[in-house]
């Protein structure tokens, strides 16, 4: 069932569901999450089952603000605190040493925990309600800490390996009408948060997103390592779905091509006049435009800037699937750090 996220009653009903150990479809500014009380291992176990995700792949825990961080994490380095101050609430996840005994299932048993403070107003309203810091709750006679939920574990609300959802309808398509979903509109960022590992003495980029290594570096005053440099140091990294080679994949086969290769391929296709079945079987998503496309081709223009492309990327891939195309040909994004997040998702979709 989809509830309007802007309605305070929807927030209260959703918070009750979380407290009772149920799952919730939650809008964030990046993608929608499938949320459960991060301190309730039984509820968190249901997330893994619903997604078909291996139980040792850690989930991100979402908090209302930095005040909930010490509940989950310990030995927090100064540079991680600086990143919270600079980028929270926002699309940045920090991997920190986990406080022993807390959120074991959410962390997939790892000694570390991923924390993020989302900026989406609906996510903020829910998290503040759960923490008991909403202004409307100030006068309620509750013993301190009663029913308090410090944060929610929420991976992207899609089946394991599939394209992340950026609307409430996408989430409903993944999990059906039994799941309670808060509608927060279309996500403004559109790809998952940047993930910075803060447990290795120096920031390490585990997943590119809207916040770039350059921005992180400017705040920490430390070089941001790439995770490839990490394995060179022979340090074990936990299993992490978002970093698997094949992920974010639509049903159709995705191929990344240069504009020139696209042009050549489309010219070859052009000679299909006279075929009976004119339903599009190939989708093209590119910044380049082409003249006289075959009726078999469904063309969608890729925006010229990375942020707009990220915002519509997953919805576009889902739409191509819904149109029944078998192939998706995508123009390779520009070789520019601003496009790293989009390029990363496309490369995984193309595996
Ligand atoms: O934008 C986002 O981050 C979205 C929204 C819902 O907030 N969430 C999201 O969660 O993408 P999920 O579960 O699909 O991605 C979780 C990823 C893991 O695949 C892994 O890469 C990383 O977060 N992660 C979480 N906890 C970790 C840990 N303890 N150590 C290393 N990586 C971790
Ligand atoms: Mg995911």
Image (tube, rainbow, N blue to C red):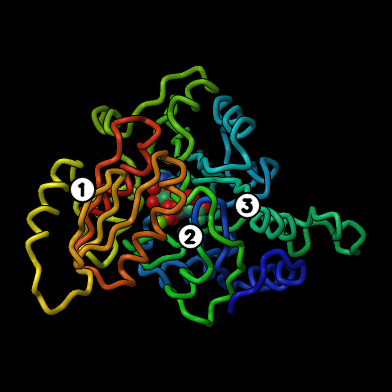
Expressed as whole percent of the image width and height from the top left, the position of residue 100 reads 54, 47
Say which element carries label 2.
loop
Choose mark 1 or mark 2, whichever is in front: 1
Q: Do the residues labelled 1 and 3 touch (CB within 8 Å)?
A: no
Residue tagged 1: 256
Measure the C-alpha gap from mark 1 to mark 3. 32 Å
Residue tagged 3: 120
Expressed as whole percent of the image width and height from the top left, the position of residue 273 reads 9, 68
Checking the image for residue 20, the label placed there is none
Left or right side of 259 for 71: right
Q: Could you tell me if residue 75 is visible in this image?
A: yes
Q: Are marks 1 and 2 in contact (CB under 8 Å)?
A: no
Q: Choose between 76 and 293: the one closer to the eye.
A: 293
Measure the C-alpha gap from mark 1 to mark 2. 22 Å
Expressed as whole percent of the image width and height from the top left, the position of residue 215 reads 49, 26
Residue tagged 2: 166
Image vertical order of residue 263 relative to residue 222, above or below: below
Measure the C-alpha gap from mark 2 to mark 3. 12 Å
Image vertical order of residue 158 relative to residue 248, above or below: below
Choose mark 1 or mark 3, whichever is in front: 1
Q: Residue at x 20, y 58 (%)?
A: 293
Q: Quadrant of residue 160?
A: bottom left
Q: Dot 2, how many residues are within 10 Å of its Cα: few (below 14), some (14-19), or many (20+)? A: many
Q: Which residue lies furthest to the top in this view?
A: 221
Q: Which of marks 1 and 3 is nearer the N terminus?
A: 3
Say which element carries label 1.
strand
């Amino acid at each position: 069932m989809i509830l309007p996220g802007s309605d305070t009653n929807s927030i209260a009903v959703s918070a009750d569901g979380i407290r009772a150990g149920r799952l919730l479809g939650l809008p964030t500014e990046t993608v929608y999450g499938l949320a459960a009380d991060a301190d309730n291992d039984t509820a968190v176990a249901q997330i893994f089952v619903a997604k078909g995700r291996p139980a040792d792949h850690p989930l991100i825990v979402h908090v209302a603000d930095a005040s909930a961080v010490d509940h989950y994490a310990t030995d927090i380095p100064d540079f991680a605190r600086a990143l919270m101050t600079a980028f929270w609430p926002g699309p940045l996840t920090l991997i920190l040493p986990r406080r022993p005994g807390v959120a074991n299932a959410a962390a997939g048993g790892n000694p570390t925990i991923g924390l993020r403070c989302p900026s989406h107003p609906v996510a903020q309203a829910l998290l503040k309600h759960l923490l008991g810091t909403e202004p409307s709750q100030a006068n309620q006679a509750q013993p301190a800490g009663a029913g308090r939920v410090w944060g929610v574990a929420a991976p992207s609300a899609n089946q394991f390996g599939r394209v992340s959802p950026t609307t409430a309808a996408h989430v409903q398509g993944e999990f059906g009408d039994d799941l309670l979903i808060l509608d927060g509109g279309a996500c403004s960022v559109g790809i998952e948060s940047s993930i910075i590992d803060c447990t290795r003495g120096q920031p390490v980029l585990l997943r590119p997103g809207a916040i770039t290594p350059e921005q992180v570096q400017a705040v920490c005053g430390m070089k941001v390592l790439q995770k490839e440099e990490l394995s060179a140091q022979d340090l074990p990294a936990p299993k992490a779905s978002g970093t698997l080679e094949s992920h974010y994949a639509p049903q159709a086969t995705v191929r990344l091509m240069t504009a020139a290769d696209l042009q050549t391929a489309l010219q070859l296709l052009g000679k299909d006049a006279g075929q009976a079945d004119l339903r599009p079987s190939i989708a093209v998503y590119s910044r380049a435009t082409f003249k006289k496309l075959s009726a078999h081709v469904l063309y969608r223009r890729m925006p010229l800037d990375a942020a707009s492309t990220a915002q519509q990327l997953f919805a576009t891939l889902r739409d191509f699937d819904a149109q029944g195309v078998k192939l998706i040909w995508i123009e390779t994004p520009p070789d520019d750090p601003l496009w790293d997040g989009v390029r990363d998702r496309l490369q995984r979709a193309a595996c």
